[in-house]
Image: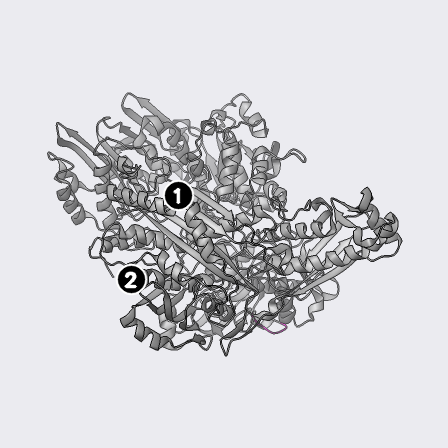
Amino acid sequence: MTGPLGRPAPHESAVGHVTGRAVYTDDLQPPGCLHGVVVPAPVACGRLLAVHTAAAAAMDGVVCVLTAADVPGDPLIGPIVHDEPVLATDRIRFKGQAVAVVFAPDREQARRAAEAVRVEVAAEPAVLGIDAAVAAGAFHTAPHIIARGEVQAALDRLATDGVVVEGEVRVPGQDHFYLETHAALALPQEDGDLCVVSSTQHPTECQRMVARVLGIGEHRVRCEVPRMGGGFGGKESQATAPACLAALGARATGRPAKVWLERHEDMGTTGGRHPFLGRYRAGFRRDGTLEALDVQLFSDGGWTSDLSGPVMDRALFHLDNAYFVEHLRFEGRVCRTDQPSSTAFRGFGGPQGMVVVEDALRRGARALGVPPEQVRRQSYYRDGQPAPYGQVVPAPRIAAMHERLADDAGLAARREVIAAHNAASPFHKRGLGLMPIKFGISFTNSLLNQAGALVLVYADGTVQLNHGGTEMGQGLHTKMVAVCADTLGVHTDAVRQMRTSTDKVPNTSPTAASSGSDLNGAAVLAACTTIRERMRPVAAGLLGVPPETLWFADGAVHGPGGASLSFADLAKQCWLQRVSLASTGFYATPGIAYDAAAGRGTPFFYFAYGIAAVEVELCGLTGEQRLRRVDILHDVGDSLVPTIDRGQIEGGFVQGLGWLTDEQVVIGPDGGVRTLGPSTYKVPAVGDVPLDFRVQLLDRATEPGVVGGSKAVGEPPFMLAIAVLEALEAAVAAFGDAPFELRLPAHPEHLLRAVEQARGHEVPA
Amino acid sequence: MRPALRFHLDGAPVEVTDLHPTTTLLRWLRATGRTGTKEGCGEGDCGACTVVVVDPAHPERGPRAVNSCLVLLPQVADLQLFTVEGLAQGATLHPAQQAMVDALGSQCGYCTPGFVMSLVEACHRPDLRQAAPDDWRLDDQLCGNLCRCTGYRPIRDALARVAGTSPDDAVATSLSAPPASPRGSLDYQGDGGRFVAPDRLEDAIALLAEHPDARVVSGATDLGLDVTRRHRRFPLLLSVARIDELDGLDEAGDALRIGAATSLSTLEAATATALPLLHRMLRYFGSRQIKHRGTVGGNLCNASPIGDLAPVLLALDARVELASVRGRRRLPLSEFFLGYRQTAVAPDELLVAVHLRRPPPDARRGAYKVSRRRELDISAVSAAFVVHEIDGAVAHARLAFGGVAATPVRAIDAEQALLGGSLDADLDAALAALSAQVRPIDDDRGSAWFRRTLAANLLRGFVAETASVPFAPLAPGHSATVAAGSQPSGASR
């Protein structure tokens, strides 16, 4: 094959990135543009009595101060339930909630005026954190239950015939810390139409919600996305509010209006990964098989329901991870708190669910006195076994991948080296940990599994590519250009990836759930195939050969006996012969459906697999740790662009490492976020990455029915980092035999606490 | 004539007037349409805004990557400034840019301009030419730039490819020009604010005598936060950055004098051989960008309980030199810190220099810092120890800590417990005395329990680490601040 699919390639915008020429939303500076600054609520909970704006409105440069009273349409937005007032109406629901927005030509003027707006609130006690919400009965959702078999009876039996362990895990939240904070620019058009340029993963939702708050039809709003400086889920639903505020400013003034959040505003008012509380009872047979699992999950949804329901669904769907569990009961419920609203974040609940089941697995292995590997080998899905919700897990690859990684990474020999090191080193101990994953691919809300594309071939043989997906750094556009070029048989530099825009492809789904290339790739493939098949008979006529003997490659169409015609000449001939060179493409994932009330269905089109082995060194004096070596074997099917996929695997792993070790969102007693910047919120830096980082893509891994035989890769590698916990616990255990509890995130203080416990020393509660 | 700021931006002369002196370089760049340089945090902790500056008076110092979000516009006056937008020659990318493309070093691209500029500095660091792949200086070069997408491996690969290659670029041209005369003084006013940078100490202290309310600024790595995060506009700033007497490290035998306005990177370069104990602390001290701007005087006068220079300087019995129109005086650093963020510096006084003596080569020495993240983080606890044993008896002991009290402190009782005894045999007595003296607080960086435990454990680690050598440099790929035991023992290999 000579096409671009499956070949290494740089990022499609790489030259723009390194020269500073790649455009992001805040880089756009139209003449006369106003800057909007949000007035934040001063308390976490209360009744909004009054908003005094007169002093601010009279200040130098201020063009307008908008409150909820200035919203012409429906003030309530939200991705599923419309429960998010774009500006506060009568209630304050978290500290930092948008109460008003000030517009001025200079951002400093707007900011000073925003500080002059006086917000009167009758404060009420706030509900902060999961425990308080459970105690107060504050929930966004009813319990979602997935069950099968007889879990209580099985646990009773295993209490005597095997081992039953109980545990409670507090899984931390996480800030997205995309390098580009939220930004939106609203540009007034003719007749009151609006163009909104937004850093969003979901341009259609921005378009829809802007139309809603303005009270106009969706056909009068266009949303464009140049690119994002990182998204990770944080811009799936929560880019909508800044876009709506900018739109309100543009509508009120008739001028371009921008809302860009400073880092502290972004971290203080937009939400991150859901913190979870998991309680479990797990029953194991003496041979290590995980046979019964009873789990109760609570998540902290924050002030609005946002995407919390589906996040909980995905957490429940991944409580089995890669293990067949015969008897189980999984229950999950979303808490409502007076805090920033938790939202989508890479893995979308899957990581939280997996942390809980892996904790149960490690605890069970300790109780059985066997290595966790033995429990895994006994418990991996075997061909044809059903997942908890009934979907059959076909030909699971994970058990074979485990054996291959164990061989390639030399785990058995390294365990001996580690044991010898630990015996000789008093203060620095090493540990090894594994993490297999099985991750379901498809939006769990089945209707979102659709995508569109619009491909335009010009008479000189060049191509404009539009699809519904957005680029946030994950390389979607690079892959889509490869699919398009491969299908039309042209070089990638003949294909221009256009800015994502809702007037090119309507009614799109968010670029999320790792589904971007699966869904949009199939739509691009369909559009390009349509055009190619229209061009084929024209070429056949010109070359005088049967159409079915022609193939498109290397910028030309080729026939038997060396006959060929350049793609450019063919395009021109098609135009002269009045053959359409433009087409839409559409794709809807077949065969998926889920019944939440019954807890049964086929939510996923397929499963992605991966496995990681991690070796750490832990200092027993300070709690500092370092990853010495990481080996990953990951299943991406047949990679569309292997360089892009490796980048997703390495980057996802390191982001997961940050989540489980040094990143910690701190909420103060007043409900305000205290970690408002990278000075206090520590994402991994260059010195945190593994000293020796080896990534392999599983070969001969074709996924039938997916574009190019590939598999989704955006989210699954994130969860491989859970191996770090097993490695750290092994290192802690090398310091002493006493029982210990490793709290999350596993930063130096929590690690040192666990080490002191393992040594049998007292530690504070 | 209206006061103006003049500098070179990507080779072209620029003149700025009428802007308030607290206008940051980043805001000015973006407001004038140079949007290639990005704002990621506004607090010098992410590096997306990194640009490179060359001081024509000091080309020997090489180009310096700095955080443009924390640089005030008057601070670049008379300098050569390079941004990501000026690197490529037409369609030909700069080697740092090409290396990032080839290594897949960009994903979302938002941090990329900052990384490219850090790589540009690295291109012109001859000391990195032979850096081994696991050399910590490669990490140090990049630790001021955060990337949330790639996991860094490809960016580190790109760095390793270009570090020390000295390409023939615009930066090289500016470095090869003959050194210009010193920058002279600067007195800039704009939009109601004034920024004065005298080039003579007597002018600076005279101005301070006249305006004791002037805010003294050196590198602005802390003051910049007042501007970007607390939105303060200072009416009068007095910069000490152009006073030669305050800049640099002088050695006379075992006596060292460090000028108060010496940047931490200059200090780092000078102490690699001159004072390895201090050099070791500087490994995990801010980032390359912060060390280029932050100064010795700033770190001390800030008087934060967790300033990382203070423990090392306390352990070396450093004395500080202060000057005012009333004269000069010296006092021990241990009398310099009066309370939480309070110093003995009078309103009309300037910190001029730090004086200290090199410890004896056979003294046991160690410098340690524990923070949540190893790089570019504020310490939970830092410590520095100098213990000199003569004929098996402790003749001199200095145990200094940051993060365990309202100021950096010496653990006097623990020092006393060691005197005349043996560091190894009397460790328990010293730990007991330490435990009685240390009174840390709970905060978001660590609980009191954590800090107390760390203080004791760092002393334990020091004793173990220096059992066979008086001073242990950090090994490449080390996993913790204490090196003891991280060397594989014979049995494990």
Q: Nearer the viewer, residue A100 or A747?
A: A747
- Magenta residues? A72-78
The residue carrying pointer 2 sits among few (fewer than 14), some (14 to 19) or many (20 or more) residues within 10 Å by Cα, namely: many
Residue A672 appears at what percent x and percent y?
41, 63
Residue matched to label 1: B375
Q: Is residue A73 magenta?
A: yes
Q: Quadrant of residue A668?
A: bottom left
Residue matched to label 2: A368
Seen in the picture, residue B312 relative to A582 is either above or below; the reply is: above
Inter-mark Cα distance, 1 to 2: 40 Å
**Label 2: element kind:** helix
Q: Nearer the viewer, residue B290 or B185?
A: B290
Residue B65 appears at what percent x and percent y?
49, 36
Quarter of the image that includes the C terminus of chain A: bottom left
The residue carrying pointer 1 sits among few (fewer than 14), some (14 to 19) or many (20 or more) residues within 10 Å by Cα, namely: many
Q: Amino acid at mark 2?
A: Leu
Q: Is residue A224 magenta?
A: no
